[in-house]
Image (spheres, grey):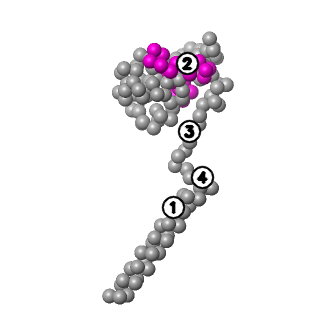
Amino acid sequence: MSAAAGGVGGEAGVPVRYYRLDEIQKHNHSKSTWLILHHKVYDLTRFLEEHPGGEEVLREQAGQDATESFEDVGHSTDAQELSKSFIIGEVHPDDRSKLKKPVESFVTPVEDNYSWWSNWVIPALSALIVALMYRFFVAEA
């Protein structure tokens, strides 16, 4: 078994159980559905049929880090509290760096020339053309 009890760090001094990524990835089917949220491992097998978003949503994320998807949905505080009852352990500290880091999609890279054109040059040229057209038509009247 690749899970190992760690040091004291859980609630009320209960030792934390650590799971390796290869072990978590094996639990990606309807008979055993695990996923990762904020480095905690959840066994959602018994919750599949009760999930308000449907079983398929959880099955798509099974065996992997679903933190970004969970946060994007904007779960209620009740859902966040309920989720705590499904925690079975944490991702082993040595495997945490292997989890994909969420990409900040609203940050535009400096080297992205398309964004520079679409955000500044095209609107400025459009405004200049509209101003010239307005001046031309007002001068004729």
Q: Nearer the viewer, mark 3 or mark 2?
A: 2
Q: CA distance from mark 4 to mark 2?
A: 36 Å
- First of labels 1, 4 by sequence position: 4
Between residue 7 and residue 36, name the one nearer to us: 36
Does residue 113 appear anywhere in the picture?
yes
Residue 109: which disc? 4
Could you tell me which secondary element the residue under label 3 belongs to? loop
Instruction: Identify which residue is drawn at 42% across, 28% down.
Output: 57
Residues tagged 3 and 4 counted as in contact (Cβ below 8 A) = no
Tag 4: amino acid: Pro
The answer to which quarter of the image holds residue 53 is top left
The residue stretch that appears in magenta: 20-42
Label 1 secondary element? helix
Name the outermost residue toward the left. 141
Residue in the foreground of this view, choosing between 1 and 4: 1
Marks 4 and 2, the one that precedes in the sequence: 2
Q: Position of residue 100 (x, y in %)?
A: 59, 34
Circle 4 Cα neighbour tier, 10 Å, few/some/many (<14 / 14–19 / ≥20):
few
- Badge 1 amino acid: Ser
- Residue closest to the far top: 1
Mark 1–mark 4 distance (CA, rounded to whole Å): 14 Å
* Residue 89 in sight from this viewpoint: no
Query: Given contact means CB atoms under 8 Å apart, are the residues at marks 1 and 3 in contact?
Result: no
Q: Which residue is mark 1?
A: 118
Left or right? Give the position of 13 relative to 73: right
